[in-house]
């Protein structure tokens, strides 16, 4: 075990690794200063410029004291005035710049709910850290940006396992471009334990495969690279699983789900939906009265979908975003969670 003591101390932190523990006393923190390589005060994204840089974000180095490791930087964006409560990641690096394409910026704006052709006030900020306990923030850079209407291509990772012949045919999507990937997948290998791994590419590339560092395959943590370590396991037998992989902190959650609809028509009880393994949708044909309803998993209000804009795209359920039935009748209700974004349709029979 080795010890390093730095003088002129303000605070003391412990940095750990697999092999040693280093004790540092921090000198005064120097915050990074964020700027852009060109003016981004008012930008209208054009179709013929999607493959060009929105800008290159540059910054001065953060410092936490002599002899300490170089900082890692995470650039993020959010709507102005939101205090970065729902930030979208623009990348991580140990260098002093990140370039952002117009296509990436456009995609992020659309995923934030900004209408094409409408301007939005955006804030950018840099998070600098040398470990989870030692970090600082940069100044905020602002921009007014107008997105273009295009088909959104969400960041994707790929999943292969016992259920699909170990081919990367299933996908998880990061719908906020925040390195948190989610997907709903029907998994069945005839056993209660269903093994799988993930990858940044739809191929077996050693440094890009994601698995479980523990032999159990149920640790809830992730290993990236070295073939991902061990298989990850879904352990509740055949079924429709929500898989959420957080590649910011390398954790995973796996939830088996059964879906229903609940609303005014059934007194907010639960009318089950049936899953079609060929079409990959949940559906039911139901007599409904005019009023609101939502989709709900496992008869549990912790996983519910409504529709903020009543546009056929599902949003996390809240008190004020019921999906609406405008007149009594018999309806075919269809929910599709197989891609991104999640969608639904209502067909009156």
Image: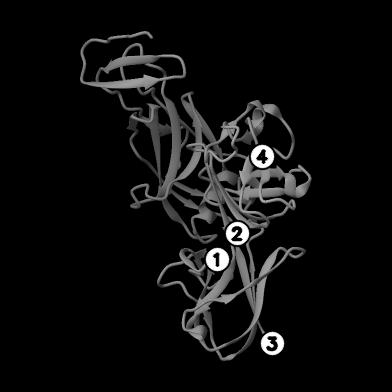
Q: How many neighbours does mark 4 have within 10 angstroms: few (below 14), some (14-19), or many (20 or more)?
A: many
Looking at the image, residue 301 sits to the left or right of residue 49; the answer is left
The residue under the point 37% across, 51% down is 80
Q: Which residue is nearer to you in this view: 129 or 223? A: 223
Contact between marks 2 and 4 (CB within 8 A): the answer is no
Contact between marks 1 and 2 (CB within 8 A): the answer is yes
Looking at the image, residue 64 sits to the left or right of residue 149; the answer is left
Structural distance between the alpha carbons of marks 3 and 1? 22 Å
The residue under the point 61% across, 66% down is 343
Looking at the image, residue 331 sits to the left or right of residue 250; the answer is right
The residue under the point 57% across, 91% down is 328
- Please identify the quadrant where the C terminus is shown: bottom right
Q: Earlier in the sequence, mark 1 or mark 4?
A: 4
Structural distance between the alpha carbons of marks 1 and 4? 27 Å
Structural distance between the alpha carbons of marks 1 and 2? 7 Å
Q: Earlier in the sequence, mark 4 or mark 3?
A: 4
Q: Earlier in the sequence, mark 2 or mark 3?
A: 2
Reply above or below: 119 against 307: above
Per the image, the residue denoted by label 2 is: 341
Q: Which residue is nearer to you in this view: 273 or 236? A: 236
Q: How many neighbours does mark 2 have within 10 angstroms: few (below 14), some (14-19), or many (20 or more)?
A: some
Badge 2 element: loop
Q: Earlier in the sequence, mark 2 or mark 4?
A: 4
């Amino acid at each position: 075990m080795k010890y390093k003591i730095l003088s002129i101390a303000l605070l003391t932190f412990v940095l750990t690794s697999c092999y040693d523990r280093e004790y540092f006393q921090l000198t005064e923190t120097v915050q990074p200063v964020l700027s852009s390589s060109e003016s981004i005060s008012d930008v209208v994204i054009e179709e013929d410029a999607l493959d060009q840089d929105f800008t290159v974000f540059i910054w001065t180095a953060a410092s936490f004291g002599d002899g300490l490791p170089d900082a890692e930087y995470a650039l993020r964006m959010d709507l102005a005035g939101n205090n970065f409560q729902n930030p979208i990641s623009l990348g991580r690096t140990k260098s002093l710049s990140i370039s952002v394409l117009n296509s990436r910026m456009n995609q992020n704006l659309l995923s934030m709910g900004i209408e094409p052709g409408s301007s939005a006030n955006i804030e950018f900020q840099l998070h600098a850290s040398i470990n989870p306990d030692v970090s600082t923030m940069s100044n905020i850079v602002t921009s007014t940006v107008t997105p273009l209407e295009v088909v959104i291509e969400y960041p994707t990772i790929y999943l292969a396992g016992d259920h699909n012949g170990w081919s990367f045919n299933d996908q998880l999507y990061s719908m906020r471009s925040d390195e948190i990937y989610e997907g709903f997948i029907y998994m069945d290998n005839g056993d209660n334990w269903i093994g799988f791994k993930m990858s940044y590419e739809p191929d077996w590339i050693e440094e890009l495969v994601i698995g479980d560092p523990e032999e159990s395959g149920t640790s809830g943590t992730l290993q990236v690279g070295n073939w991902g370590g061990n298989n990850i396991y879904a352990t509740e037998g055949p079924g429709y699983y929500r898989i959420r992989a957080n590649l910011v902190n390398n954790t995973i959650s796996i939830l088996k789900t059964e879906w229903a609809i609940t609303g005014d028509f059934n007194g907010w009880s639960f009318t089950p939906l049936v899953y079609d393994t060929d079409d990959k949708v949940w559906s039911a044909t139901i007599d409904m009265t005019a009023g609101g309803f939502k989709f709900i998993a496992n008869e549990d209000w912790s996983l519910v979908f409504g529709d903020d804009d009543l546009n056929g795209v599902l949003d996390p359920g809240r008190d004020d975003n019921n999906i609406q039935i405008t007149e009594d009748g018999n309806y075919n209700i269809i929910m599709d969670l197989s891609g991104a974004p999640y969608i639904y349709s209502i067909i009156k029979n």
